[in-house]
Image (cartoon, helix red, strand yellow):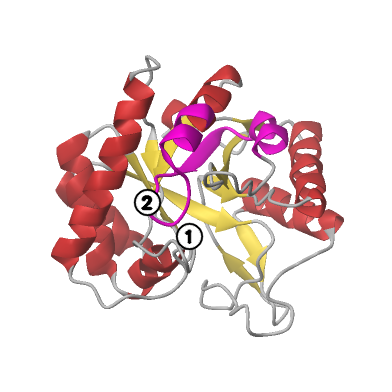
Amino acid sequence: MPLNQIDLNSDVGESFGHYILGLDAEVIPHISSANIACGYHAGDPTVMRKTVALARANGVALGAHPGLPDLVGFGRRNMDVTLEEIKDFVTVQIGALQAVAALQGARLQHVKPHGALYTMAVKNPAIWDAVAEVIAKLDERLILFVLAGSDRKELEAIGKRRGIRMAFEFFADRAYNSDGSLVSRKLPGAVIHDNDEVAAKVLKLVKEGRVKTLAGSEIDLKAETICVHGDNPKALALVQKICETLKAAGVAVKAPADFL
């Protein structure tokens, strides 16, 4: 990937009924890819329709953000489910958002599993493969977002076998271990709150392909998309800071379908 462009993605469309979550209208103008909740962990048909419209109005690529069927737990609790069940869950959610997008004359660019489904896949690559199998059958043009720091060769092999593209994802405000994994949120320092520090970290990743770990060492890490959270005013300021820093360095924010 050229060092002058990167994708910024954010989880959006997570309101439900009368309950408003996130700052979608404020965040979406600053990103290039939107991960839209599909109703299992958050979101509902009306929210999905409105979020697709908002993303399209801002020229932002559409992505499905399927999760486990755990609305009460916001999809963040592990579930004892089979690979076949996971394929069913993902199929229904991607299909629903595909239909919503199609009615607005649009198609999906990518799929990014949500919450516990994502973290379960990081520990069990067979889940990535199951999701990739579904994606390949629904629309082989879809890009699967996976965690940077995982075994890149293994995941690229899954993508090649299934005939789909992978985009490796970096988390802007999270600390990394020396093996490329994310520092557990249970540990101090797992989340970085200094906007300048996070922006500098993102720029170093894009320009040098390196990341400073929590222990102070540096590791090589390659990513095509960066997750930025904007579900509160402080996080929104961070998204704006990252965008300003990238722009000042001559780095264009583009959806991965434009450069992968």
Q: Which residue is drawn at 38% across and 39% down?
A: 110
Q: Verify CB contact (< 8 Å) between mark 1 and mark 2.
A: no
The answer to whether residue 210 is left or right of residue 245 is: left
Looking at the image, residue 108 lies above or below residue 137? above
Please tell me whether mark 1 sits on a helix, a strand or a loop. Answer: loop
Which quadrant of the figure has residue 105?
top left
Is there any visible trace of residue 156 in the rendered image?
yes
Q: In which quarter of the image is the C terminus?
A: top left
Please tell me whether mark 2 sits on a helix, a strand or a loop. Answer: loop
Residue hosting label 2: 66
Is there any visible trace of residue 160 in the rendered image?
no
Residue hosting label 1: 148
Closer-to-camera residue (74/142): 74
Local crowd size for mark 2, using a 10 Å CA cut-off: few (<14), some (14–19), many (≥20): many
Which quadrant of the figure has residue 122?
bottom left
Q: Residue furthest top?
A: 105
The answer to whether residue 101 is left or right of residue 86 is: right
Residue 172 at x, y = what percent? Answer: 66, 56
Closer-to-camera residue (167/132): 132
Front: mark 1 or 2:
2
Looking at the image, residue 254 lies above or below residue 193? above
Residue 29 at x, y = what percent? Answer: 68, 29
Which quadrant of the figure has residue 111?
top left
Type of amino acid under label 2: Pro
Type of amino acid under label 1: Ala
Residue 82 at x, y = what percent? Answer: 18, 71
Residue 84 at x, y = what percent? Answer: 14, 63
The answer to whether residue 197 is left or right of residue 120 is: right
Magenta residues (range): 24-50
Looking at the image, residue 50 lies above or below residue 142? above
Q: Residue furthest bottom?
A: 187
